[in-house]
Each structure stands twice: as C-alpha cells, then as structure tokens.
Image (spheres, rainbow, N blue to C red):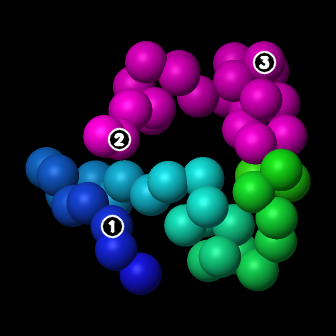
Amino acid sequence: MGHLLQDETVWLTQQQMADLFQTSRTNVVEHIKHIYGEGELNENSTCQKFR
C-alpha cells in the first residue's frame, strides 16, 4: 500500500482507505462527508489533494 508520511501524519487516498477497511470507495466517501458535516474534523486540516 503506497502512502505518504508527512510530519508524523499518514495520508491515504480514498481508495487506499477503502482497501484498508475492506469496503468500497463510495462507502468511505459517504462516511467522510458525514464526519465533515457533523464538524467532527476540519476538512482543511485533514484533506489534501494528491497529484
């Protein structure tokens, strides 16, 4: 599994999270939307675009 380690933080793509938790990318996206919607995490602090 390719991941990015930056300042003691592991960054994974949505697909990598889906593989890790043995679920679909769609399911991961749905959970992420709820987490941000409920204010549990700040999107700017926990989301980064990979190129």
Q: Which x, y percent locates residue 13?
A: 50, 54
Please give the residue where the numbered disc 1 appears in the rendered image: 3
Cα–Cα gap, marks 2 and 3: 22 Å
The kind of residue on which mark 3 rests is Gly
Q: Secondary structure at mark 1?
A: loop
Q: Position of residue 21 (x, y in %)?
A: 71, 75
Q: Residue at x 65, y 76 (%)?
A: 19
User: How busy is the neighbourhood of tag 1: few (under 14 within 10 Å), some, or many (20 plus)?
Assistant: few
Between 8 and 13, the one lying in front of the other is 13
Query: Measuring 85% from the left and 40% from the top, which residue is drawn there?
Result: 30
**Earlier residue among tags 2 and 3:** 3
Crowd rating for badge 3 (residues with CA inside 10 Å; few <14, some 14–19, many 20+): few
According to the picture, the residue beneath numbered tag 3 turns out to be: 37
Which region shows up in magenta? Answer: 29-51
Instruction: Report the side of 15 relative to 33 (left or right).
Output: left
Quadrant for the C terminus, please.
top left
Rendered position, 15 above or below 6: below
Residue 11 x/y as whole percent: 37, 54
Left or right relative to 17: residue 12: left
